[in-house]
Amino acid sequence: MRALLVLVAALLAAAPLAAQDLLPPAPYAYKQLDDPRQEAKAQALMETLRCLKCQSQSIADSDAPMAGDMRHQVRSRIAAGEEPEAIRQWLIERYGDYVTYTPQVRPLTLPLFAAPVLFLLVAALLLRRRFRKARKGEA
Amino acid sequence: MSEATPPARKRAALWLWLPLALFAGFFVLVMVGLLRPADREVASAFVGKPLPTFDLRPAIPERPGLKTADFATGKPRLLNVFASWCIPCIAEAPQLDALARAGVEIDGVAIRDREEDVQRFLAQNGNPYTRIGADDLSAVQLAIGSSGVPETFVIDGQGVIRHQHIGDIRIEDMPKLLEKLREADR
């Protein structure tokens, strides 16, 4: 019985190991930047970037080695003085809009940004007509 | 009064069907999503662009490392992103071997790998690579828009990425890959 338990435990441990690399995580995968302001910038950016391995997680949330390497990439670029939006664009250039959780203005997403403005305009026009009618009624 | 009621009632009866129609539409949408899940592969947006500048140290002493200038040979090459810890990479090894034997030059980028592991992997599965660069931080992988292992890129003689194959190369993928190599040669 004990041998069986050991075997099961060994199998459970071996399966994830087989598909994982054995290298230590990238230097900045789990280490914050020394400058808290830079780290805050990096953190804010990482929370809005998609992990390409675990696609519903952000790279800030994921423990996939690739997400660690992406965090390293983000943190070392921020430390080198790059702006977060430039890093986001760098990734979009390579992976498309899918890599970022922040909606980008594109022909396809334009209605998303234009609709509120349009609604406000229509509302303003309607209100103006209402007020004019009301004033005429008074007169 | 009696003349006005029938059309109005007819219209009301039509409206009554609307929720059911909406539900049917929703049901179809859910079933399509369940039966044909969306493609979860992230294609590189870097196809058509020149390789970014990189210079990787050799992953094993038996082969040189890999840098951008190695691709400016005038002949198309394959860039294979792989890892010894990647199981589909074992599945595509025979296909890579066949390509290498057919005279296709293949360069490897080993993702997050140790020298002894790469050596063991190549001893077991064959070594189709002319050069193998070690990408310990997935930096080159990120720079070319690759989101996993294995992935294979067709690079033309000027170092421009011409095609990306996501996942292991299966026998049925070979004709398309060879076609893309020929296209890159033109």
Image (cartoon, grey):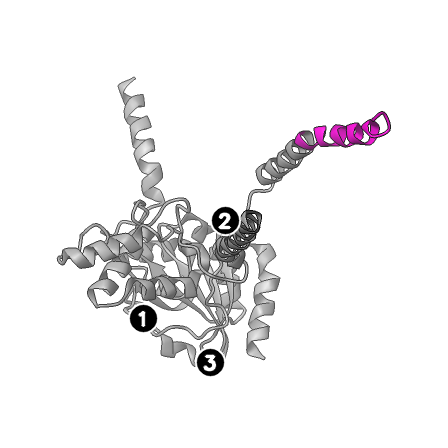
Reading the image, the residue beneath label 1 is B65
Q: Residue furthest top?
A: A1
- Pinpoint residue B35: horizontal percent, then vertical percent: 61, 38
Please tell me if label 2 and label 1 are on a single chain.
yes
Say which chain tag 2 marks. B
Reading the image, the residue beneath label 3 is B158
Say which chain tag 1 marks. B
Judge from the rendering whether residue B127 lies leftward or rightward of residue B102; answer left or right: left
Q: Is the magenta stretch mostly helix, strand or loop?
A: helix
Judge from the rendering whether residue B45 lies leftward or rightward of residue A90; answer left or right: right
Q: Residue furthest right?
A: B3
| Of pointers 2 and 1, the one earlier in the residue sequence | 2
Is B182 contained in the magenta span? Answer: no
Reading the image, the residue beneath label 2 is B40
Query: What span is in magenta?
Result: B1-19
Is B17 contained in the magenta span? Answer: yes
Instruction: Give, as a three-letter code, the residue at label 3.
Output: Gln
Q: Tell me if residue B64 can be seen.
A: no
Q: Which residue lies furthest to the left in this view?
A: A34
- Pinpoint residue B32: horizontal percent, then vertical percent: 62, 39
Please tell me if label 3 and label 2 are on a single chain.
yes
- Pinpoint residue A80: horizontal percent, then vertical percent: 21, 68
Q: Tell me if residue B6 can be seen.
A: yes
Instruction: Give, as a three-letter code, the residue at label 1.
Output: Gly
Judge from the rendering whether residue B136 lies leftward or rightward of residue B15; answer left or right: left
| Of pointers 3 and 1, the one earlier in the residue sequence | 1
Q: What is the CA distance from the residue labelled 3 to the residue labelled 1?
A: 19 Å
Q: Dot 3: few (<14), some (14–19), or many (≥20) neighbours within 10 Å?
A: some
Q: Residue at x 51, y 56 (%)?
A: A121
Judge from the rendering whether residue A3 lies leftward or rightward of residue B121; answer left or right: left
Tag on residue B114? none
Instruction: Give, as a three-letter code, the residue at label 2.
Output: Arg
